[in-house]
């Protein structure tokens, strides 16, 4: 099945499963809401976040689920393709094929028990995804406020970021972004709180899941964080008796990551400049549709700036475009405000662990890579906050005083 073909993403036969139509739907809706709110409040209590603020973040984010579900009723959206893949033809038998699935197909297979056997509607399944991504925003808030609880500017900017409409819209509902941002922030939170090695099994499982969900992101992050297993002083490989094992093992880990990276790009093309240039040009032209800019005639630096702060102009009277422009103007002003504060006070590069800087390097790598192959502003808005939240944390550390 071609998940991202126009026919499939617009195939609105799934609309019959979109909302609440029977007792089963209503019972699941109540159970999901109660269970989700309970677990979110357990997290809020554990992190010692203000009860009202934590629940505001959760319910504000949760409200976007209903906009996303309504939006997908008419327009092309990943939730349509993923849910249709999971739901399938209920009357048809399930065929088991031994093949490596990735991306939306991988997620669609995982959701088969929920969509087909438990008969969850799109709305109910979307609520589960949104509760998951709510944890990312709560963890992000916890990270920022723990840097320096007395720094009101950092907290204010953090809250501005958390309520950005595009951030909440694109991380709600049945989407890969909902899960990727949750994985990134959860791993980052563990790193900052020195729990990376303590929770290494959980993190390893999440990384492997991410490799199947987003092969290029997961593979690159896997390679970067694997370095900490061999170079960090807290690693088992820092002991003398294991030190000769770290290089062969890292080679094995790298080959594993490259194998899955090849799902996104033919590995043979990496070693050919002409093939890389052709791949980039094809991706650029592919995304120069709709609300986009002429990426081909720009340089690398301009592309990075557009990826972070764009768009800053309107092509139509679309509310979507208007929100994106206003958001990015706010983001630019916030960056200027924080930069002024950093320059005004004495600052130093934060002395944090090796894994922290691997996450920063990963985020910068992804911003550079994606900014050079993405021209459509909708796709940019959908992907960039996966990495910008991590970069913002680094900026907040610079503005710690």
Image: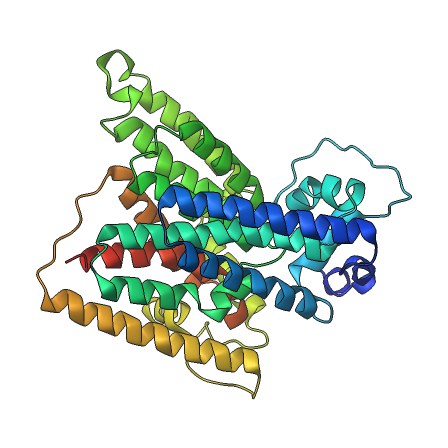
Q: Quadrant of residue 334?
A: bottom left
Q: Quadrant of residue 14?
A: bottom right
Q: Nearer the viewer, residue 214 or 170?
A: 170
Q: Position of residue 310 (x, y in %)?
A: 41, 74
- Report the number of discs: 0
Residue drawn 48% across and 37% down?
207
Furthest residue toward top: 241
Residue drawn 39% across and 27% down?
251
Q: Quadrant of residue 35?
A: top right
Q: Is residue 265 in view?
A: no
Q: Quadrant of the C terminus?
A: bottom left
Q: How is the image coloured?
A: rainbow
Q: Is residue 330 in view?
A: yes
Q: Is residue 288 left or right of residue 348?
A: right
Furthest residue toward front: 51
**Above or below, 259 relative to 121:** above
Furthest residue toward left: 346
Furthest residue toward bottom: 317
Residue drawn 42% across and 48% down?
44
Q: Nearer the viewer, residue 401 or 276?
A: 401
Q: Is residue 258 left or right of residue 16?
A: left
Q: Position of residue 316 (x, y in %)?
A: 56, 87
**Above or below, 259 relative to 266:** above
Q: Position of residue 97 (x, y in %)?
A: 76, 33
Q: Position of residue 389 (x, y in %)?
A: 37, 57
**Above or below, 275 relative to 342:** above
**Above or below, 255 relative to 327:** above
Residue drawn 57% across and 65% down?
64
């Amino acid at each position: 099945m071609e998940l991202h073909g126009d026919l499939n993403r617009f195939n609105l036969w799934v609309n019959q499963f979109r909302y609440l139509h029977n007792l089963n739907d209503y019972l699941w809706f109540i159970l999901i809401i109660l269970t989700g709110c309970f677990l979110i409040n357990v997290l809020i209590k554990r992190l010692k976040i203000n009860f009202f603020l934590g629940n505001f973040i959760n319910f504000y984010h949760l409200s976007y689920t209903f906009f996303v579900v309504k939006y997908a009723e008419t327009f092309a959206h990943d939730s349509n393709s993923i849910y249709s893949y999971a739901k399938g033809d209920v009357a048809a038998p399930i065929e088991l094929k031994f093949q490596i699935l990735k991306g939306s197909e991988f997620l669609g297979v995982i959701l088969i028990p929920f969509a087909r056997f438990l008969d969850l509607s799109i709305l109910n399944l979307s609520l589960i995804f949104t509760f998951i991504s709510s944890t990312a925003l709560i963890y992000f808030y916890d990270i920022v406020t723990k840097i320096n609880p007395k720094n009101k500017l950092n907290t204010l900017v953090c809250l501005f970021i958390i309520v950005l409409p595009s951030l909440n819209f694109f991380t709600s509902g049945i989407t890969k972004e909902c899960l990727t941002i949750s994985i990134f922030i959860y791993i980052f939170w563990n790193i900052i709180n020195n729990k990376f090695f303590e929770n290494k099994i959980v993190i390893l499982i999440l990384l492997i899941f991410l490799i199947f969900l987003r092969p290029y992101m997961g593979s690159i992050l896997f390679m970067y964080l694997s370095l900490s297993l061999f170079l960090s002083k807290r690693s088992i490989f820092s002991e003398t008796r294991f030190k000769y094992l770290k290089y062969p093992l890292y080679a094995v880990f790298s080959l594993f990551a490259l194998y899955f990276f090849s799902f996104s790009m033919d590995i043979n093309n990496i070693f050919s400049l002409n093939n890389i240039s052709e791949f980039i040009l094809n991706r650029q032209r592919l995304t120069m549709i709709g609300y986009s800019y002429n990426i081909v005639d720009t340089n690398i630096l301009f592309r990075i700036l557009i990826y972070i702060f764009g768009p800053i102009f309107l092509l139509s009277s679309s509310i979507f475009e208007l929100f994106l422009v206003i958001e990015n103007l706010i983001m630019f002003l916030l960056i200027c405000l924080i930069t002024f504060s950093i320059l005004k006070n004495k600052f130093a590069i934060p002395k944090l662990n090796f894994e922290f800087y691997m996450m920063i390097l990963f985020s910068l790598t992804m911003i550079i890579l994606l900014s050079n192959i993405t021209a459509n502003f909708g796709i940019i808005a959908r992907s960039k906050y996966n990495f910008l939240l991590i970069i913002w944390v680094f900026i907040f550390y610079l503005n710690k005083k």
